[in-house]
Image: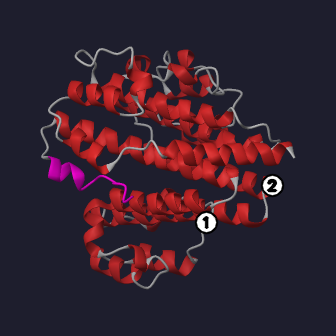
Amino acid sequence: MLDNFSGNAIMTKAKAMYGSHLTVSQYRELMNKRSVSEIAAYLRSETQYGDVLKEVNPGSIHRGQLENLLRESRFLQYRELMRYNTAAKTDYYHYFIAEIEIEQILRMIRLLNMGTPEQYVLQYPRFVERYISFRMDRMAKAKSFDDMLNVLEGTLYPRQLAGLRPKPGELIDYTRCETALYNYYYAEIEATVRRCFHGGTRNQLNEMFQVHVELINIRNIYRLKKYFPGAAPDMFQKSFVSAWRRVPSSDMERLTDAGDEAAFFAALNQSRYAKYFEPKDFEFIESRVKNIRYQSAKRHLHFTGAAPVAFTAYMTLCEIELGNIVSIIEGVRYNVAPAEIQKILILPND
């Protein structure tokens, strides 16, 4: 009985909170702003982000600070939903925290490769310090790959990364680290879903994550084909997320074996994902992938009767909205025309 009450509360709250999402007209207002300060002022006064921005002076805020506060807003939305979680199946909802942990590890890897690990302290998300499995204040002091692994000791992440230690004088292989971490991440979610849920709830969660993982793989294959036309077969294997793969191996082999972009499109047209893509979509491949996720999440949030599905759909929609705002901030900073910014946004159609 308590589990049912908790689930209904999470589902109802998620659907209600989505009612505060940014509208098309609000996106247009943001795209027409002339500075980060103007964007911050509008978000503070006209949108749900006002709560996290109420103590901020829009005139002095910088891009990194604004983006960090917007990420804090997404985390607070997660915490708001978790207030209603009294069910036993709490393990599943932890995937959101694991996502943040992996983002922080990858950020440190990027900084190490750039030779600027000291910059980590400037923007790490202090609002999650008490919830994650490693000390971010210690991470901020890391100067090498081994330092980072020492910070992560006691978690499961060193097991995924230890074999990827760079040789002296070499950069860390970011792509392999990213693939290793996300393979672990999605495999853990898949196992949790299989352990905790059954019936329609399991099927709906499987569908959402399967679509997402397969789109990641298709996107990665296309990137390699476009930017590394002579890529060896093992490069494709290193970029694959192996969990939740529904696309038959033969389809994946046709995509990876394609000799050029035209052959890639021909192979894609013979796969189960042909209905999602046209050649023009690959000019903005990231946006097309996000749009497919957006449509899937929106449909599941509207129709589901299961709390874990509503939670996952809602947090996906929040992630996409956050990505839209960050894209607008970047576009405005570099004086990109609103019409060009809009091409890479996922706008609501309701």
The residue type indicated by label 1 comes to: Glu
342 part of magenta stretch:
yes
Q: Which residues are magenta?
A: 338-350
Please say if 68 is above or below 233: above
Q: Is residue 187 visible?
A: no
What secondary structure is found at the residue carrying circle 2?
A: helix
Note whether 96 is above or below 245 in the view shown: above
Q: Looking at the rendering, which quadrant does residue 326 occupy?
A: top left
Cβ–Cβ under 8 Å for marks 1 and 2? no
The residue shown at (18%, 33%) is 333
The residue lying at 46 percent from left, 62 percent from top is 295
Q: How many marks overall?
A: 2
Q: Which mark is residue 195?
A: 2
Is 1 positioned to the left or the right of 156 in the image? right
- Can residue 98 be seen? yes
Judged from the image, the secondary structure of the residue bearing numbered disc 1 is helix
Q: Which residue is mark 1?
A: 207
Q: x, y percentage for residue 187?
A: 66, 53
Q: Quadrant of the C terminus?
A: bottom left
- Could you say where residue 79 lies in the image, as x and y percent from the top left? 61, 31
What amino acid type is highlighted by mark number 2?
Arg
Quarter of the image where one finds residue 119: top left
Residue 175, above or below 300:
above
Quick one: label 1 or label 2, which is nearer the N terminus? 2
Which residue is situated farthest in the right direction here? 1
Q: Is residue 37 covered in magenta?
A: no
Name the residue at 70% across, 43% down. Answer: 9
Q: Position of residue 303 (x, y in %)?
A: 60, 63
